[in-house]
Image: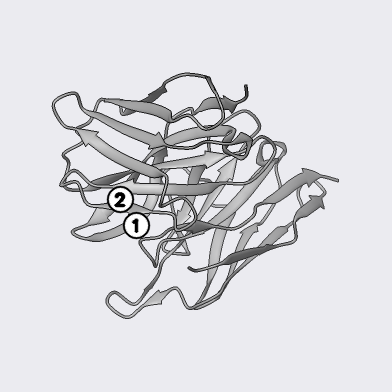
Amino acid sequence: QLQLQESGPGLVKPSETLSLTCSLSGGSITSSTYYWGWIRQPPGKGLEWIGSIYYSGRTYYNSSLKSRVTISVDTSKNQLSLKLSSVTTADTAVYYCTRGRRDGYNLYYFDYWGQGTLVTVSS
Amino acid sequence: DIVMTQSPDSLAVSLGERATIHCKSSQSLLHSSNKKNHLAWYQQKPGQPPQLLIYWASTRESGVPDRFRGSGSGTDFTLTISSLQAEDVAVYYCQQYYSTLNSFGQGTTLEIK
């Protein structure tokens, strides 16, 4: 049974960098069937895709966040990470780690989501 | 970027009645390579992460009750719950994966009337 566990600071100061890790158990981040993504949800609002990656390191980012986002994988630790720089209060959200189905370079729907972690940006 | 627009924003339906949610994309999601519509539906219950309900616009994920049906093609899609149950109270999102730059609809809140 796949488990995705997000972890990281729950409070980040404005202008600093938000850093989160997603640890996979029950599956391999190097799987050729899946890719990995981060999605966030501000309190009481909808879902916003942040970006996606597959194990070769190829990344795709939301246009509105691209200049501030870095997503990477650590295959030795079976982990996915997210870094979001220069945060503001608008970045306060629950951040979800997700697994997506893929076929080669074709990326499809997200079939598994972590429980999410709330990150608050505040001084 | 592809923009996804859902309607209505909220919906109240009586138990046992039909609920219908619409999703419109700013460009066609029908991919010429596989002749499939690259659209998924998710259900999010309070305090929980979203769960995949339907993909390829009309394929139910394993374990999803058959009262959930996805339909549509091109730019217009519909999620229908044929007979609303109390456990279906949730926010429903559509998502396009036609582009590698994913995007979601704003969500539709479904409540019991």
**Please, which residue is most extreme toward the front here?**
A15
Question: What separation in Å lies between label 1 and label 2 (alpha carbons)?
Answer: 5 Å
What amino acid does circle 2 point to? Arg
Judge whether A88 appears above or below B27 on screen. Answer: above
x and y percent of residue A73 in the render?
Answer: 23, 36
Can you tell which quarter of the image residue B98 is in? Answer: bottom left
Say left or right for B89 vs A61: right
Residue shown at the point (42%, 45%) measured from the top left: A68
Q: Which residue is mark 2?
A: A101
Q: What's the colour scheme? A: one colour
Residue shown at the point (72%, 48%) measured from the top left: B109
Are dots 1 and 2 in contact, CB under 8 Å? Answer: yes
Say left or right for A84 vs B34: right
- As rendered, which of A95 and B64 lies closer to the eye? A95
Say left or right for B69 vs B21: left
Q: Which residue is mark 1?
A: A108
Chain name for mark 2: A
Chain name for mark 1: A
What amino acid does circle 1 point to? Tyr
Say left or right for A97 vs A31: right
- As rendered, which of B98 and A15 lies closer to the eye? A15
Q: Dot 1: what SS? A: strand
Can you tell which quarter of the image residue B62 is in? Answer: top left
Q: Earlier in the sequence, mark 1 or mark 2?
A: 2
x and y percent of residue B86 in the render?
Answer: 72, 37
x and y percent of residue A55 in the render?
Answer: 18, 43
Residue shown at the point (78%, 44%) measured from the top left: B111
**Please, which residue is most extreme toward the right here?**
B113
- As rendered, which of A12 and A60 lies closer to the eye? A12
Residue shown at the point (16%, 31%) measured from the top left: A75
